[in-house]
Image (spheres, rainbow, N blue to C red):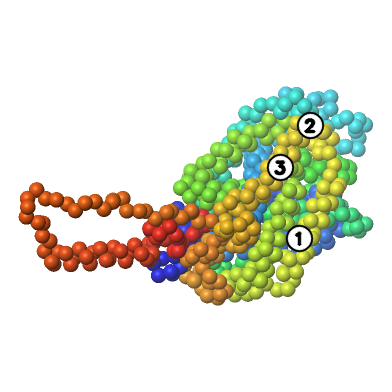
Amino acid sequence: MGDDNGQIIEKDQNGNGEPRARWGNRIEFLLSCIAMSVGLGNVWRFPFTAYENGGGAFLLPYLFVLMTIGKPMYFMELALGQFSSHGSVKVWSVVPALKGVGYGQLTATSAVLSYYVALMALTVFYFFASFSSVLPWMVCDPSWADLTRCVDPTTNLSQLTSNDTMGSTEMYFQMNVLKELPNIDHGIGLPCWKLTLCFLFSWLVVFLTMVKGVHSSGKVAYFTGNHLPIRRADHSPDQRADAPGAYDGVVFYIKPRWNELLNARVWYAAITQSFYSLSIGFGPLVMYSSYNDFRDPVARDAAIISVADMLTSLLAGFVIFGILGNLAHELDTTVDQVIKGGGTSLAFVSYPQALANFPGVPQLFAVLFFLMLFTLGVGSATALTGCVITILREEFPSVSQLAATTIVSVGGFLVGLVYITPGGQFILNLVDFFGGGFIVFILATLEVVAIQWVYGINNFCDDLEFMTGARPNCYLKFCWMFFIPLALMAIFIYSVATMQPLTYGKVGYPDSAMICGALLILLTLLMLPVCFAREVYRANGMTLLERVRSTFQPAADWGPAENEQRKEWLQATGRKDPLAGRESHRRPRPPLQPRRPSYRPGPEPTYRHSVAFAVPPPALERGQRRLAELTRRHSAPHRSLGGGYVNEAVTGSRTDVADERV
């Protein structure tokens, strides 16, 4: 907004008069981003995805996608947040017409957050179960197992003659932990009380981590960001290179199947894995970087985090498949026979089965493994929760950090109870597919097009050069402007063209569930036209075309948040300050009509006595000067604070309005 002299006044960063919080140091930011990226997906999603899509051959498309899509978009999102000091919704003051992209990302983030903490609850359940004198999944307990089909983990699978058998680890997970239903045609059941307590504990940890914002989450990152999968699993005695079967497992993991490179499904898997692992297109990256100092080397940060994520993904694959290879050797079978699938099956079936066969004290390694999973989950859940909290506080500035954290945590707990019911895994798979799946490709495509084409690649590069002192190279410009939009659109078209009916395992979904999933996508997409119509309604211009055009221009509060930096930015780029005039796209209030005098001239006053009322000459002169001063003031706009509104009330026009966009 403008002051009395038309100077630039520092933007209210939180909307409540408080300065925006900052990280304690760059290490906290880097560790928080690493903890977010190196999450559960690196442990149980990447290894199985690589194995399914060509083994070692998958690494080539994955590295290519990481360098051409993942790292450039990671850099772009970090730069947007750091430059504007805004969250993933308010940052769209850069192109107000597409503010719905930010709300769509909020919907996707909320969907993923709703089930992510439920997965953490499973790790808590297994963590406490690991303190038993005998690991409970090592034996077929009659209280939950079907003894006619149950097989303990130490059984040699090559000696089995029936195909109807099930390992005790798999049966323990399905029948004792999840109490899983065969389908959800008749409902999903009620939450399990044991899982409910674990779920409550998980949300309590997330709440305490975020209760003071980045001041508290940054300190927690020293723990969550340092506990990488390889460091935990290296404590395992079976992770020596000479462990029986470990080499075979690693070879099984990296053995290339070159013919898969021509399969579009492999490239689709590489892009989805990159998005899922780096958290691109969801909003937490913008949120985290918005708490950075303005001059932080964002390009270096993006390179460090993306490389760390790639290395931990690869190392996690070596560790896990080494353990599975050793398990296959102990059971006298092949590696593919001990892999029950990716995701939760790998984390809660295959790996616990391997832990049960560890020599010595398997309980110790089970405790370490599930503690690792929980800490990795905290790192990612904190980022997702912080993204929602930041948006809530920016949209409603009067809400405190404590109140916002409480609202998000309580709401997330109540919504997430659906995932710890007997049919919860069906719902989790449904929400993951519709809420956090290919819909993110649409939002990411609109995001990169809006920044590089609507706002403009030159403007964006000017902003980066002003902020960091370095201008992006031609390679990044090419990726942002051409390769990323075209690649994402191609992947989206491919995913729609090859879409198969959604199943959980081999079980299909009822029509009602599919309708709910379609409504989730519709809700996300509706954010785009609704927000666009809202911005057009609030825009400047007499005609509809003028209003539409103005919504594709940056709003008044776009730019650096700090006062001095904003001055330097405007001088360096030669732009006018929208906060000092009517450059914003928001439409001003309708002008007020000038007030008319409320009195009418009447007859000359008469007095009770015949002596006329005489005014002394000095008093008459003072009155005339006072009347002239009042007349002069009412005939020109005031330049004091709020002068625009005073002038509006008197003359019916607003010539000095600091039309700030909130």
Residue at 62%, 72% (x, y): give it: 462
Question: Residue 517, can we see it?
Answer: yes
Mark 3: which secondary structure? helix
Residue at 76%, 60% (x, y): give it: 485
Pointer 1 or 3: first along the chain = 1
Mark 2: which secondary structure? helix
Q: Which of 526 and 22 lies nearest the eye of the viewer?
A: 526
Left or right: residue 374 compared with residue 44: left
In the rendered structure, find residue 511 and report the number of the disc placed on it.
2
Do the residues under discs 1 and 3 have CB atoms within 8 angstroms?
no
Left or right: residue 236 compared with residue 82: right
Query: Mark 3 sits on what residue?
Result: 522
**Three-letter amino acid code of the residue under disc 2:** Asp
Q: CA distance from mark 3 to mark 2?
A: 16 Å
Q: Residues within 10 Å of mark 1 (few under 14, many from 20)?
A: many
Residue at 10%, 56% (x, y): give it: 613
Question: Residue 176: x, y in percent?
Answer: 72, 29
Query: Mark 1 sits on what residue?
Result: 485
